[in-house]
Amino acid sequence: MKGTEDTRETNRYIALDIHKEYVLAGGQIAGQDWVMAPRRISIVKFREWATANLYAGDAVVLETTTNVWDIYDSVAPLPPARWDSAIGMVPVNVVLEASE
């Protein structure tokens, strides 16, 4: 998938698959090497996890869901350089497949 954005500043691609009671998160670098193995984070603990694990230079992909804006409000003030909302992008699918 080619875009027009300059991704040279992107260090990691973090996918967040958001469910009602938990978030499934995982991350890869551009070469598709895992830098964050898929993990399940309780919604209650998500803000604490995001503060500790998301960094400037991360590109974060949110799967669109009914509570996406609650999650966005939790992480928007944090340092990641870009926020993308998408359905079916490869990082999200990889995280979903890893959880099955």
Image (cartoon, grey):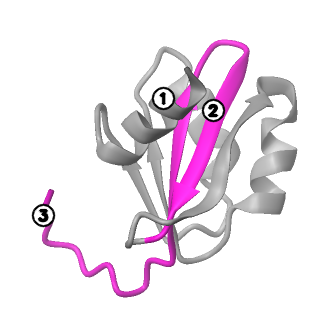
Pointers 1 and 2 in contact (CB under 8 A)? Answer: yes
- The residue indicated by pointer 2 is 24
Instruction: Give how far apart the Cα atoms at labels 1 and 3 are.
Output: 22 Å
Residue 78 shown left or right of residue 8 in the figure: right
Residue 32 shown left or right of residue 18 in the figure: left
Identify which amino acid the numbered label 2 is placed on.
Leu
Pointers 1 and 3 in contact (CB under 8 A)? Answer: no
Front disc: 1 or 3: 1
Q: Residue at x 25, y 81 (%)?
A: 6
Residue density around tag 2, few if under 14, some if 14–19, many if 20 or more, within 10 Å: some
Residue 31 shown left or right of residue 12 in the figure: left
Rendered image: mark on residue 62: none
- The residue indicated by pointer 3 is 2
Camera-side residue: 17 or 35?
Answer: 35
Identify which amino acid the numbered label 3 is placed on.
Lys
Count of numbered marks: 3
- Magenta span of residues: 1-29
Identify which amino acid the numbered label 1 is placed on.
Leu
- The residue indicated by pointer 1 is 96
